[in-house]
Image: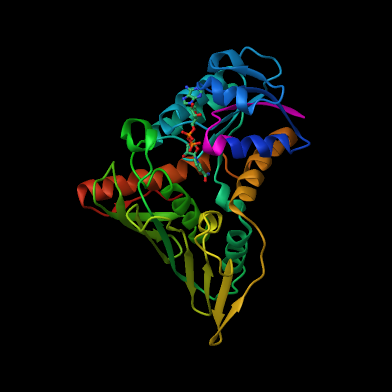
Amino acid sequence: MIGVSLVGLGEIGQVHLSALRSSDHIQVSALCDLDEERLNGSCRGEWLTTHFDQILERPDVEAVDICLPHNMHAPLAIRALESGRHVLLEKPMAMTVAECDQVIAAAAAADRVVGVSHNQLFYEPHQMLSKMISDGSIGDLRTIRARLAIGGRYGSWRSDPSQAGGGLLIDAGVHRIYMLQELGGPVVAVSANMDMPGMEESYSIILEFSCGAIGTIDATYHGPSGLFDDQIEVVGTQAILEVAGCEAQFEGFDDGPSLRQWSNGAWETIETSDSWDRSVAKSVQAFFEAVSRGVTPRVDGVTGRSTVAVIEAAYRSAREGIRVELPFA
Ligand SMILES: NC(=O)c1ccc[n+]([C@@H]2O[C@H](COP(=O)([O-])OP(=O)(O)OC[C@H]3O[C@@H](n4cnc5c(N)ncnc54)[C@H](O)[C@@H]3O)[C@@H](O)[C@H]2O)c1
């Protein structure tokens, strides 16, 4: 059992809380949120506080799960790591690559583990997509098209770039970036267009993968009310694969087959059964189970940083009107 304190009991914090409570490997020792009503309403006997630093004084807190606005990810992760706690961060790992580097350095100095919840990697249709690309079922990978269209702009801290680190890209757009990295492999160059870089509400991005394939993302907040479209389509030389969307299913936008393939002139549905909230639960539980077993988590700090590096390159590309190359080792 690993003792975990959850920090941030908002929208995603509640999904983390259910996942933490339902794992046999995790003891939820403490909860922290600035909002006392939310704190009390979430409590099932855990120790409660509105002050982050107080959880770091408790011996039963071995790890901290951070579900906070983006500007708090790096500073609070560093405080927790320096106090000897392992840290799971919600996406994105931090607002900049420089912040990610500080978090990684703090983890190394304290010999603790940092990970990031890239939950859609755990969504079964996405895992099947990844496997069918890597085992050659679709032939050679040529293009990956990722959509993100939402019916209305998110508010609260998300509308403040100083708290969010940007607009739609560094918020819901993060899932598109790490999924394309998962499916296409290392990204060697990024070209982006945005309506308002840093406060973007619509954008398009081209990713060039080291394997020679191309990834495209088009995204907007300005769809009709009720829309959530996060479909992914993969084109190979032998087949096309389509995932109807991970959050689309959760938001009730899509009720078609989760995964289908077109090859030899016909569409075929590939049976899968999973959901967005289960992908979050699996992602959270996998991190703490990896830490308990002393193995590297699926999304460690280096992987989390690589996603922020692509996001940062996209902002630079959009601001300067250039194609930005990324170092590829
Ligand atoms: N994986 C996903 O699909 C997904 C979905 C939603 C949000 N997220 C991510 O989760 C994180 C949180 O987003 P959210 O939608 O849950 O936000 P939210 O606004 O719903 O919740 C944030 C919570 O943090 C609390 N808080 C703020 N500052 C605090 C502090 N200093 N100490 C303690 N508590 C504090 C607030 O009171 C609030 O309860 C972000 O990184 C976001 O990108 C991920």
207 above or below 82?
A: below
* Nearer the observer, 67 or 236: 67
* Nearer the observer, 220 or 4: 220
Q: Quadrant of residue 116?
A: top right
Q: Position of residue 34 (x, y in %)?
A: 50, 21
51 above or below 237?
A: above
Residue at 61% across / 26% down in the picture?
41
> Magenta span covers which residues?
1-13
Find out whether residue 3 is within the magenta segment: yes
**Position of residue 216 in the picture relative to residue 5 (left or right):** left
Q: Position of residue 217 (x, y in %)?
A: 38, 59
Q: Quadrant of residue 137?
A: bottom right
**Position of residue 191 in the picture relative to residue 287 (left or right):** left
| Residue at the outermost bottom position | 265
* Nearer the observer, 60 or 230: 230
**Position of residue 235 in the picture relative to residue 5 (left or right):** left
Picture mark count: 0
Residue at 61% across / 40% down in the picture?
15
Residue at 60% across / 62% down in the picture?
125
Find out whether residue 156 is within the magenta segment: no
Q: Position of residue 94 (x, y in %)?
A: 44, 34
User: What's the image's color scheme?
Assistant: rainbow
Residue at 25% across / 50% down in the picture?
318
Q: Is residue 1 visible?
A: yes
| Residue at the outermost left position | 320
Q: Is residue 295 visible?
A: no
**Position of residue 141 in the picture relative to residue 129 (left or right):** left
Q: Position of residue 252 (x, y in %)?
A: 53, 58
* Nearer the observer, 38 or 6: 38
Q: Quadrant of the N terminus?
A: top right
